[in-house]
Amino acid sequence: MDNRQQLLASALVEHISVGTIILDTQLRIQYWNAFLERCSGKRLEDVRGRPFTQVFPEADTLYLHQIIEQARNEGRHVYTQWRDTPSLVRLTFERAQQNPLMLQSTLLFPFRIAPDDALHFGLVLYDTTDLAKSSNKLEAALQALSVKQTEQEQLIKKLEKANDQLLQSEKLAAIGQLAAGVAHEINNPIGYVFSNLQTLAGYVRDLLRIIDAVESAGGLEDLRQLKRSLEYDYIRSDIEALIGESEDGIDRVKKIITSLKDFSHIEEEEFHPADLHRGLNTTLNVVNNELKYKAEVIKEYGDLPDVECIPSQINQVIMNLLVNAAHAIEQFGRITLRTAHEGDWVWLEVEDTGKGIEPRLLNRIYEPFFTTKPVGKGTGLGLSLSYSIVQKHHGRIEVDSELGRGTRFRVWLPVRQPTPTEESPTPHE
Ligand SMILES: Nc1ncnc2c1ncn2[C@@H]1O[C@H](COP(=O)(O)OP(=O)(O)O)[C@@H](O)[C@H]1O
Ligand SMILES: [Mg+2]
């Protein structure tokens, strides 16, 4: 360095708003700059040669001696910051009036003028109030963020619970709806079985009269006469018809009840391999009452393996799709049920010839409570719950609809549920 550079360097040290102190190995103050004079209120002439810890008694701590040893023995730059307590030196910085905290950081490092010259320590003290402030702000922001996150997690838990409750209440609503349909379905066969029984009771009375007459009748001709007058031949053939018809009626009731039991499986909540066609058929039996006046139902089933699922939940999805299809048909139409197996996936499809869905509504139909139906007819929950059931099964729902032509919902399900660590497979198109 030439002379001018040296002058510039020392002018810089005098003008910089950073405290700069030079200590010898005994920690005696050799030099400090104008900034330190201003902050400490002590003049350099008065402190030169005096031990640092005498001028700043508060700095005479184990900590100071530790960092001096580090700097001396390991030749290291040792940095202390405002967070470290106690702070090394309590300087009143120029603007300390506004900020009594006097946040400061220090840097202590060993140096020599030349390799064979005596060891000195440089101690640099600077005001880090702004940094500390922004760091505090940052910390506060982080803290607020973590509070927000906890709040969000709690909210998600609440939503999950609400969703479960919705699922439960939709199930109850569906069961209510079903009960009405089933009552209607059962009413008819029960009605004619009952009337058949009444007719049969009359026949039995007549037959008993004939048998009783065996004891009292005067002769065979009297008995023949009685048989003719009671239309024995007709009774005989009608009894067979009545019994056959009643058996059919009871059979229908039995079938409906079995389907209902199959459909609900209320207690079963575990995934297990199940026959989807059986689920489709029982669901069809159960909603038959809603469908039969609205559509002809066509089954186009493919070959399906057993599919790992919660059958009662899949039945509920099928039911929602079937009921929606029936609702969409204004006069009388067609509902086609299709299934197919593709690799690790199966799909089932409900297609109707109903009024279709407006394109602008297509992305809203899965929203909870979205319905275009009059109050009392639609809850707007069917598709949103179907969606969450299918999601829980790691599958997906596709919809294809044309206004005035009809709608097709396709539900893709993986044949096997992915194990928890496995990535869920993607359906191939
Ligand atoms: N097959 C379909 N044809 C026409 N529109 C449909 C069909 N399925 C669903 N939608 C539309 O999606 C809406 C939401 O269906 P959903 O969630 O089952 O509720 P909801 O049936 O109670 O209205 C229905 O109101 C209807 O507008
Ligand atoms: Mg619905």
Image (cartoon, rainbow, N blue to C red):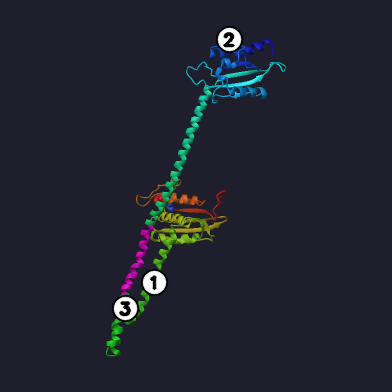
Residue plotted at (64% across, 21% down) = 109
**Left or right position of 297 against 31:** left
**In the depicted structure, whether residue 84 falls above or below residue 156:** above
> Is residue 404 visible to the viewer in this orientation of the structure?
no
Return the residue nearer the eye: 242 or 144: 144
Q: Earlier in the sequence, mark 2 or mark 3?
A: 2
| Within-10-Å neighbours for mark 2: few <14, some 14–19, many 20+ | few
Q: State how far apart marks 2 and 3 are (Cα).
A: 135 Å
Q: Residue at x 64, y 12 (%)?
A: 8
- Quarter the N terminus occupies: top right
Residue at the disc numbered 3: 204
Left or right, 113 with respect to 276, comes to right
Q: Which residues are magenta?
A: 177-199
Q: Secondary structure at mark 3?
A: helix
Query: Measured from the top left, where is residue 41 in percent x and y?
Result: 53, 12
* Residue farthest along the right direction in this orientation: 116
